[in-house]
Image (cartoon, grey):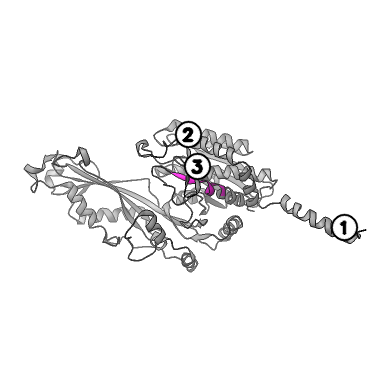
């Protein structure tokens, strides 16, 4: 007969694994939940992606917002739309936890970039489809990666925690915006009007891609963004290039020359004072960059690049500098519609990415000053006949008011360390970055909600963000649910 001590040991050996399984971590609970519900979750995500969410379809944006309010209410949240006239609503959700010491706000956006359906070769933008790419399943649709994935992951993470009986420990807020892709022109106004609702200890900004290596990333800032549209003028109407070439100035050539003078062959911006005022990185931020993966050669191969800008600097180093990009140039016609004419105008859209220490309005002024120093008379509206005759070179420059500065949160703040630990609990070793390359209106959030911001993205880097055939690796979605579950359970 077995002794009582041996029986106790046998029972303990049997019961302990069961107790371990009965108390999973938030990430384990999320993994078990998504593994057991993949088919229905893919269907739910597809239905969400099928709803048009571009600015040109305000009714579609409203459908998205209404759906998300309903989804939050199904999960026990107090949900409503925060609205002002003339702007898509912010979806707001609130879950209070008795005795909680902190409030965590989850930000994402439900709107997407404009679409040109003819450019989508895999599927129309709002007809989600699954495809296998390099051995992994991807779902194709507008906003699959940017940014409906983050919203869906947060909703499913709530389900997973509830299903596993894991309680929330902090007050939770959800702030899901409807015009981020338009530059968030009304976000600060909406949040300020409801500051008592949206204030929290930290805004977790769930937007953007993870590191190109595939590792989970935690980012402590984002570049600012400013735009300028520059139009140069030639003849009043198109002129025969044979009769008037070499005589009538060609604005397309003038624009090419003007833009070429803004940067050298290595991509360094030559506009005077363009780099003035950059706030230096801290020693902790520099150490984080030194530890981060170097993905440059892999990316060159993926993007078919035979050379890169930067004079040998790595991508992550260059992201922490301001940049000037030509988004597009328009003048005359090409291809089968090309005509032998000197075009009347040429236009370029310039994208200025900013870092901490550089004001967006000042950076716009530096570009305008450069154009003036190049011999152009600058106007803000369409020039009259009298202006064009009075000045040999005229440039119309339109400033985009939906611009904002860069923001960076110190990595050594207590709340920053808590976020890092929560993400590491779900994903293991993570990449810490001072700044992400993309721009998010972090300043509007920090000012309006009187808080700090930290970005925790989940999308794959090669998701065709902002372009045709946008997609999301399903593995990124499932990993994202685990990450969101861990963050939702922060104390």
The residues colored magenta run: 470-478
- Which residue position is annotated with label 1? 7
Discs 2/1, front: 1
Total numbered circles? 3
Pointer 2 residue: 51
Closer to the chain start, of discs 2 and 1, is 1
Q: Is residue 353 above or below residue 237?
A: below
Q: CA distance from mark 2 to mark 1?
A: 60 Å
Q: Earlier in the sequence, mark 2 or mark 3?
A: 2
User: Residue reaching furthest top?
Assistant: 59
Q: Quadrant of residue 162?
A: top right
Residue 427 placement, left or right of 276: right
Image quarter of the N terminus: bottom right
Q: Is residue 146 visible?
A: no
Residue at 35 percent across and 39 percent down: it is 119
Residue at the location (8% across, 47% down)? Answer: 247
Q: Is 485 a magenta residue?
A: no
Crowd band around label 3 with a 10 angstrom C-alpha radius: few (<14), some (14–19), many (20+): many
Q: Secondary structure at mark 1?
A: helix
Q: Residue at x 41, y 40 (%)?
A: 122
Determine crowd level at label 2: few under 14, some 14-19, many 20+ residues with C-alpha closer than 10 A. Answer: some
Q: Position of residue 63 (x, y in %)?
A: 49, 32
Mark number displayed over residue 285: none
Horizontally, residue 224 falls left or right of residue 137, namely left
């Amino acid at each position: 007969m077995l002794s009582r001590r041996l029986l106790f040991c046998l029972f303990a050996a049997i019961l302990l694994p069961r107790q371990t399984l009965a108390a999973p971590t938030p990430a384990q609970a999320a993994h078990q939940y998504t593994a057991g519900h993949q088919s229905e979750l893919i269907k739910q995500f597809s239905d969400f992606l099928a709803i048009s969410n571009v600015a040109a379809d305000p009714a579609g944006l409203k459908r998205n917002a209404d759906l998300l309010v309903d989804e939050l209410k199904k999960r026990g949240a107090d949900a409503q739309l925060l609205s002002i006239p003339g702007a898509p609503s912010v979806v707001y959700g609130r879950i209070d936890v008795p005795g909680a010491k902190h409030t965590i706000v989850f930000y994402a956006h439900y709107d997407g970039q404009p679409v040109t359906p003819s450019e989508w070769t895999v599927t129309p933008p709002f007809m989600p489809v699954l495809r296998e790419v390099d051995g992994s399943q991807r779902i194709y649709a507008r906003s699959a990666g940017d940014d409906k994935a983050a919203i869906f992951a947060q909703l499913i993470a709530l389900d997973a925690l509830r299903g596993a009986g894991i309680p929330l420990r902090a007050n939770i807020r959800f702030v899901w915006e409807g015009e981020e892709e338009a530059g968030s022109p009304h976000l600060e106004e909406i949040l300020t009007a409801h500051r008592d609702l949206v204030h929290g200890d930290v805004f977790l900004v769930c937007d953007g891609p993870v590191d190109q290596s595939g590792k989970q990333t935690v980012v402590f800032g984002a570049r600012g963004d400013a735009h300028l549209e520059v139009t140069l003028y030639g003849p009043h109407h198109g002129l025969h290039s044979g009769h008037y070439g070499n005589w009538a100035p060609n604005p397309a050539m003038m624009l090419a020359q003007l833009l070429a003078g803004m940067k050298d062959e290595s991509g360094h911006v030559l506009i005077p004072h363009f780099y003035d005022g950059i706030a230096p990185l801290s020693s902790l931020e520099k150490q984080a960059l030194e530890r981060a993966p170097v993905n440059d050669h892999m990316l060159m191969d993926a993007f078919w690049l035979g050379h890169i800008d930067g004079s040998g600097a790595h991508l992550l180093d260059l992201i922490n500098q301001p940049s000037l990009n030509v988004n597009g140039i328009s003048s005359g016609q090409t291809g089968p519609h090309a005509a032998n004419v000197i075009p009347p105008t040429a236009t370029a859209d310039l994208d200025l990415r900013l870092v901490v220490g550089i004001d967006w309005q000042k950076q716009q002024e530096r570009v305008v000053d450069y154009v003036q120093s190049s011999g152009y008379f600058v106007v803000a509206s369409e020039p009259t006949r009298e202006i064009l005759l009075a000045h040999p070179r005229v440039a119309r420059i339109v400033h985009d008011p939906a611009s904002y500065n860069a923001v960076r949160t110190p990595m050594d703040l207590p709340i920053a360390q808590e976020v890092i630990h929560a993400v590491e609990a779900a994903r293991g070793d993570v990449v810490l970055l001072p700044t992400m390359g993309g721009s998010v209106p972090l300043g509007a959030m920090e000012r309006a909600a009187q808080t700090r911001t930290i970005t925790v993205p989940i999308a794959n880097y090669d998701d065709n963000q902002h372009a045709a055939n946008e997609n999301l690796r399903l593995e990124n979605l499932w990993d994202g649910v685990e990450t969101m579950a861990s963050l939702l359970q922060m104390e």
